[in-house]
Amino acid sequence: MITRFITEVSIAFNPFRKPGSTCRKFLAHLPANARQSMKINTEVLTMDSKEPNFLKLKFKDGKEMQLDTEKLSVKDVMEEVDRHSRLLKRQADLSGN
């Protein structure tokens, strides 16, 4: 997963429900030094919480992406993130940065 262009990650998940695994697995795929290059906000919901799980991402170009982790698997989430990151990488390569 290309994380170089992500500036902020906000996650809320319930670890006691199955859809919370997508958020946990996404966090596990972030590199160990991610906190140095991006802001990471996590919120662990309680067992009886009715709030939905969510994942919000902000990229260096200003795009904000909110993904529904109730319906998407971690593979689907990573594909969406990589799709936009590859576009930004291509733009950076073409501009010479």
Image: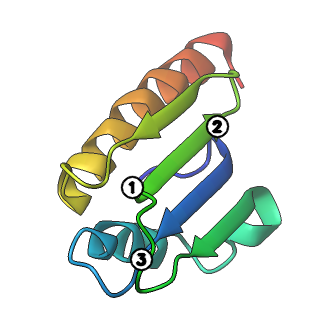
C-alpha separation, residue under disc 3 versus residue under disc 2: 22 Å
Type of amino acid under label 3: Asn
In this view, the mark in front (3 or 2): 3
Residue tagged by mark 3? 14
Number of numbered discs overlaid on the protein picture: 3
Quarter that holds the N terminus:
bottom left
Report helix, strand or loop for mark 1: loop
C-alpha separation, residue under disc 1 versus residue under disc 2: 15 Å
Type of amino acid under label 1: Met
The residue that appears at 20% across and 50% down in the rendered structure is 72
Residues tagged 3 and 1 counted as in contact (Cβ below 8 A): no
Q: Where is residue 42 in the image (x, y as percent from the top left)?
A: 64, 70
Image vertical order of residue 10 relative to residue 31, above or below: above
Residue tagged by mark 2? 58
Label 3 crowd (10 A; few <14 / some 14-19 / many >=20): many
Report helix, strand or loop for mark 3: loop
Report helix, strand or loop for mark 2: strand
**Sequence order check: which comes first, mark 3 or mark 1?**
1
Q: Is residue 3 left or right of residue 81?
A: right
Q: Position of residue 83 (x, y in %)?
A: 34, 31
Q: Where is residue 25 in the image (x, y as percent from the top left)?
A: 34, 75
**Sequence order check: which comes first, mark 1 or mark 2?**
1
Q: Nearer the viewer, residue 11 or 75?
A: 11
The residue that appears at 32% across and 37% down in the rendered structure is 80
Q: Nearer the viewer, residue 8 or 50?
A: 50
